[in-house]
Amino acid sequence: MKRLAITLALALTGCAASGPTPNAGGADAPVLRIVAEPDANGRRPVAVDVVRVADPALAGRLAGLDAAGWFRDREALSAEAGNRIAIASWEMVPGQSVLLHSLPPFATPPIQTLVYALYGAPGTHRQALDGAGALDVRLGRDTFTVAPLTEGTP
């Protein structure tokens, strides 16, 4: 229920709770940008989850899931993982962009961040980066990319 409230707040306001994300630059530096291209997912909304994981075994397990498996099992996985996982969720529409300067606080420094995007097209639709650095997520027509977000990135 708490995660649902955070998800709803993020979706409605486009910003998260205050507090810097470890290893993501200064408090005013962006920590996450999501840009949905106008033709993203064949011009249909895309569910996006940014999942920060603090446990190596759990990170390995999640890295084996495709987006369809993640979205199907995320409630059970989240309950099982407890405080070893933090999830932020959005429903992006084509042409929408979100720029966040913070994410919900996470007590343990993440060892890996995974991004899942639920596309209608077949594919894994999962990207993973080490640590908790700032992310630049680009949602395209049939797939997406994730790269480190650097200051001054357009």
Image (spheres, rainbow, N blue to C red):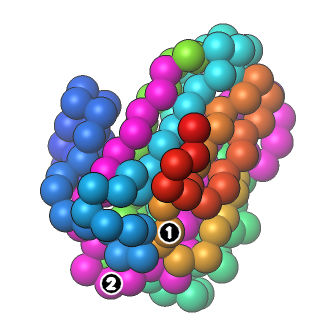
Q: Nearer the viewer, residue 37 or 87?
A: 37
The numbered mark, 2 or 1, whose residue comes first in the sequence reads 2
Query: What's the residue at 22%, 30% (across, down)?
Result: 13
**Quarter of the image where one finds residue 104:** bottom left
Q: Is label 2 in a helix, a strand or a loop?
A: loop
Q: Amino acid at mark 1?
A: Gly
Horizontal relation, residue 141 to residue 151: left or right: right
* Outermost right residue: 122
**Residue 72 appears anywhere in the view:** no
Q: Amino acid at mark 2?
A: Thr
Residue 120 in magenta stretch: yes
**Quarter of the image where one finds residue 21:** bottom left
Q: Is label 1 in a helix, a strand or a loop?
A: loop
Prevailing secondary structure class for the magenta stretch in the rendered image? loop
* Outermost bottom residue: 56
Q: Which residue is mark 2?
A: 108
- The x and y percentages for residue 14 are 30, 33
Which label lies toward us, 2 or 1? Answer: 1
> Could you say which disc has been placed on residue 133 in the image?
1
Query: What's the residue at 52%, 48% (across, down)?
Result: 152
Residue 70 vertical placement versus 143 (above, below): below
- The x and y percentages for residue 71 are 54, 46
Q: Nearer the viewer, residue 119 or 102?
A: 102
Circle 2 packing at 10 Å, graded few (<14), some (14-19), many (20+), is some
Residue stretch in magenta? 96-125
Residue 120 vertical placement versus 68 (above, below): above
Residue 56 vertical placement versus 62 (above, below): below
Query: What's the residue at 64%, 38% (across, down)?
Result: 138
> Could you say which disc has been placed on residue 18 in the image?
none
